[in-house]
Image (cartoon, helix red, strand yellow):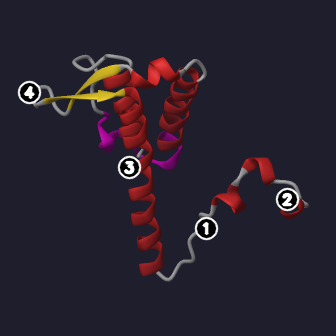
Amino acid sequence: MIYVEDWLLSSAILGRGRDYREKNFKSFQDMDAVLSYLDKVEVKTRAYLKNVNERELRRKVKLQFSPRGAVYPFTVEECLYQSATEQLYHLGELIALLWQENIKPPSMEWFSNNPRLSTPDRMNV
């Protein structure tokens, strides 16, 4: 999930397609390494999103799936939508894996995880 966000943002949206290199997933030896990568990607994504406007969302970009693969024309909005969709798919897979191990997954509802509603009286908003 982290990689797809990084790849779509760096490769297509920021236009570094040919220069972008996929992470070597075997290099992640522990959760700290994964969280470090997550932090770097989130910083980059948040910095980008600070200045996004309607014109930027409609901007056409080229998404190349591999160095020799086909190039697809998308808008920035479509790339961002794909990133969010990809994360939803994989979260569902993780939840299914937890269920298979008889582990109750964390609550995934927006109303129970919304940072705006983190106060004790959140149900009275």
Question: Which numbered disc covers residue 122?
Answer: 2
Q: Earlier in the sequence, mark 3 or mark 1?
A: 3
Q: Give the mark, 4 or 1, whose residue is nearer the N terminus.
A: 4
Q: In the image, what residue occupies the spot 89% across and 62% down?
A: 124
Residue at mark 3 to residue at mark 4: CA–CA distance: 23 Å
- Tell us which disc is closer to us: 2 or 4: 2
> Can residue 29 be found in the magenta stretch?
yes
Q: Amino acid at mark 3?
A: Glu
Question: Would residue 79 appear left or right of 116 to someone viewing this image?
Answer: left
Residue 86: numbered disc:
3
- In this rendering, position of residue 62 left or right of residue 38: left
For the point 51% across and 28% down, the residue is 45
Mark 1 or mark 2: name the one nearer the start of the chain. Answer: 1
Neighbours of disc 1 within 10 Å: few (<14), some (14-19), many (20+): few
The x, y position of residue 16, in whole percent, is 31, 17
The circle drawn on residue 82 is: none
Query: Dot 3, crowdedness within 10 Å: few (<14), some or many (≥20)?
Result: some
> How far apart in space, not on screen, are marks 1 and 2 (Cα)?
19 Å
Secondary structure type for disc 3 = helix
Q: Residue furthest left?
A: 68
- For badge 4, the amino acid type reads Arg
Q: Which residues are magenta?
A: 23-33
Label 3, label 1: how far apart the Cα atoms are: 19 Å
The residue that disc 4 covers is 68
